[in-house]
Amino acid sequence: MHATTRRRFRTLGAAVSTLALTAGIHLGSAGEAAAAVAEGPVFNKPTGTYEEQRAIRTQLLSYITTAAPQSDIKVALYHLYDEEVAQALADAHTLRQVNVRIMLDSTSVIPTDGSYEILANALGTDRTQSSFVGLCPAKRSCFGDPDALSSNGINHNKFWLFSQVDGASDLVVQSSSNMSPSGYTRMWNNAFVLPFNPAMYGTFASYFDKLVAMDWKAWKYTSVTHAPFKAYFFPYPGSGNSLDTVWNTLDNVTCKWTEGSTTKQTKIRVAVLRLTRQGVAEKLTALQKAGCSVDVLYAETDSAAGSGTPGTWEALHASGGPALRCYNHDEDGVPSTTNSVIHSKYLLIDGKYDGVVNKLVWTGSHNYSGPALRENDEALLKIDDSTYHDAYVANFNAAKAAAFPGTADDTDACKGVKTTSDD
């Protein structure tokens, strides 16, 4: 990608600010002119300090608490189990008249956490109003067919929209993180901060409004490009690999090519909580065999051991397949608590993609599972930027180094015999 001068300055600013954001540093203070919010990734570190664990949360709180009076906040989120974050959203509305609209999965309402009650009391639940907290129907996504008895869909989105905060307007934050204690302290997550982008802000806002309407009959899978970004919105009805966003992305990869007298190799890195789509697993193995370097960090696959038909665990472990590390560790030995896992969902490609040598990132809420593709409300963001790609590679290497059980992944948790919770 040939960046404009403006993009080059932004990239430099993002690279610097990412270090501050990862440490959870607030970039502005009362009485000062707000520093411009920088574009770029933010990563938490569950094995790190209190501040490192909550880096994404801290950044989101800084946007909530500086949202301008009468501005808009729109949030689509799977789980919000954080009363301080909920109260900050409530205060934005009641104290500064910010229009706060939130769409949650129905499972965000639990008796052990008061976040939903805080939001409902402050915002109301009427989705026709300028502020509300709404819930998708029980046991399905906002776009789920209510007559589909086999539906496993959820609103699994994790994006935040801010029309005006200190230092930014038209701000999109696409994350992999729920707002929950385990999301900070036991899960490796990422967020991508995209300020001053009215085109992408409008694209995400349009999807949000469709979630609010919950018109499942009118829903169609959508992808929208505003270079150097592209957004994909799920569910994606249909069947087969040709109607699979991730499979199609991987199908655009050329593993080896020649420059002069030198043979080049494409590097593919995947960090994902759940990898249970057979076509994607088989494609990753095929790409390794075709000469790509494929490195997969995952928390859960599915095994078909004993059935006579390979599952994704078996497909990935085929001879000549990719390098694999599982990060799914029950460190406290208590089955009722969440395991420590890789919870990010990103794909990194460094090499020849769609006929062009490039470095690319795909990140968002989208796991590589059947429900994530066909039934869930999800969003995925493509980022065409080499600096951001390299920042994700550094995060991938750090999470991979901490992965347990790592390569010794013949375990019930890694094989999906024991299902891993998203929260």
Image (spheres, rainbow, N blue to C red):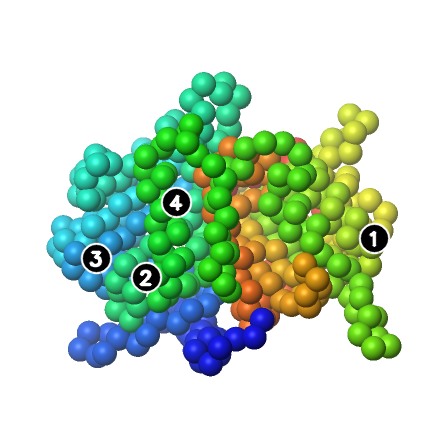
Of the two numbered discs 4 and 1 in the rendering, the one whose residue sits closer to the viewer? 4
Q: Secondary structure at mark 3?
A: loop
Name the residue carrying label 1.
289
Is 177 situated left or right of 71 in this image?
right
User: Residues at badges 2 and 3 in contact (C-beta under 8 Å)?
Assistant: no
Q: Is residue 227 left or right of residue 368?
A: left
Of helix, strand and loop, which one carries label 4? helix
Q: Secondary structure at mark 2?
A: strand
Question: Between disc 1 and disc 3, whose residue precedes?
Answer: 3
Q: Is residue 365 above or below residue 195?
A: above
Q: Residues within 10 Å of mark 3 (few under 14, many from 20)?
A: some
Q: Amino acid under label 2?
A: Asp
Q: How many marks?
A: 4
The answer to which quarter of the image holds residue 254 is: bottom right
Alpha-carbon span between mark 4 and mark 3 = 19 Å
In the rendered structure, which amino acid carries the disc numbered 1?
Answer: Lys
Dot 4 corresponds to which residue? 207
Label 4, label 1: how far apart the Cα atoms are: 38 Å
Neighbourhood count class around disc 4 (C-alpha, 10 Å): few under 14, some 14–19, many 20 upward: some
Counting from the top left corner in percent of width and height, residue 322 is at 77, 53
Specify the label residue 71 is tagged with: 3
Q: Mark 1 and mark 3: span between their CA atoms? A: 52 Å
The Cα–Cα distance between marks 2 and 3, rounded to whole angstroms, is 10 Å
Q: Amino acid at mark 4?
A: Tyr
Rendered location of residue 146, percent (x, y): 42, 22
Q: Residues within 10 Å of mark 1 (few under 14, many from 20)?
A: some
Residue depicted at 41% across the width and 31% down the height: 218
Quadrant in which the N terminus appears = bottom right
Identify the secondary structure beneath mark 1.
Answer: helix
Judge depth for marks 4 and 3 and give the one in front. 4
Q: Which residue is mark 2?
A: 170
Is the residue under label 3 in contact with that under label 4 (CB below 8 Å)?
A: no
